[in-house]
Amino acid sequence: MPELPEVETVRRGLEGHLLGRTIADVETLRDDLRFPFPSGFSEMLRGSVIESVNRRAKYLLIRLSGGKTWLCHLGMSGRWTLLGDGIHSRPGRFANGASVGSGDGPHDWVIVHLENGDRAVYSDHRRFGIMDCFPTSEESGHRLLEGIGPEPTPDHLTPEELALNLRGRRTPIKTALLDQRTVAGLGNIYVCEILHRSRISPRRMAYTIAGKSGVPDRVVRITGATHDVITEAIDAGGSTLQDFRGVGGDEAMGYFVHNFLVYGREGMPCLRENCGGTVKRVVQSNRSTFFCPSCQR
């Protein structure tokens, strides 16, 4: 599933090409993705000017004229491809071999036509993505957005807030960090990397890290590692493991995968200097966890 750095990469790509454009028409080639499209979805978007492309956690929030917000979640395999003169975007293929992004592919479900003839094509072979359109004034109470925790970036997440959100949580720290109410947008890959950099076992209980008051050193370490990992991953364009690509098509890959210290490295040596341990894989909450038992305590 695309995590926050991948969604931010897509956001930046869409913003560069869609800002200020008018939506001439919207084709929905099926009635639903994970959920049905809202009634009158195409009509709500048609004729609107795209005023900004924002993000909250893993949700794209496209602000439209008339006080509307178009929400998009990429789900497991969602991908946007931009087509038009002067746009160096190349439709490609999903990992299963199916063509994607031309507007004619078997999993191309939404085609947005802009006033200048350019198109934005949303493809999703697993159909776990989500789209909605609602008044921007109702965003804080939207069922998908309310209760989401702070963004994991240096200008939002503080050790004090993280300690508060972890305090009393009788669940493993990895599970707690994946809870979007704790921190927004973190997923399996980046939490594994964050905990390795923090030298904290993913099996340690969250309440023992937060303590009863104040800001313990472990919370400070997790906060700093979160800032670093997320910033580095965004700068690298995210991580391409299977279907994720930026809006540039098959060549728009994320390169943070080359910086993984534990994720996907089961049985390989820990890369922490002077550690000497071996990366282990366990299953937590039905997800693979990669960590080094020697240096993560």
Image (cartoon, grey):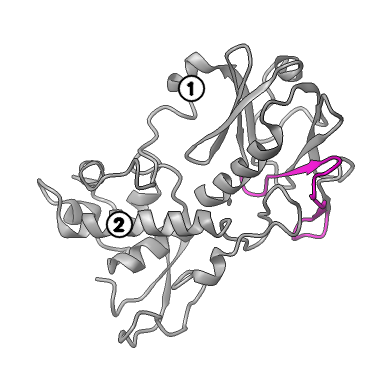
**In the image: residue 86, left or right of residue 202:** right
Q: Which residues are magenta?
A: 75-98
Q: Is residue 55 left or right of residue 241?
A: left
| Placement of 177 over or under 137, stated as above or below | below
Where residue 174 appears, as percent x and y from the top left, is 35, 57
Quadrant where the image shows the C terminus: bottom left
Circles 2 and 1: CB atoms closer than 8 Å: no
Q: Which residue is mark 1?
A: 142
Magenta-drawn stretch, dominant element (helix, strand or loop): loop
The residue located at (76%, 27%) in the rendering is 31
Q: Position of residue 165 (x, y in %)?
A: 25, 42
How far is mark 2 from mark 1, CA to CA? 30 Å
Residue 94 is covered by the magenta coloring: yes
Label 2 sits on residue:
224
Q: Nearer the viewer, residue 208 or 110?
A: 110
Q: Secondary structure at mark 1?
A: loop
Q: Where is residue 205 shown, x and y percent of the image?
A: 24, 57
Is any atom of residue 259 visible in this view? yes
The answer, for residue 172, to whether it is visible in the render is: no
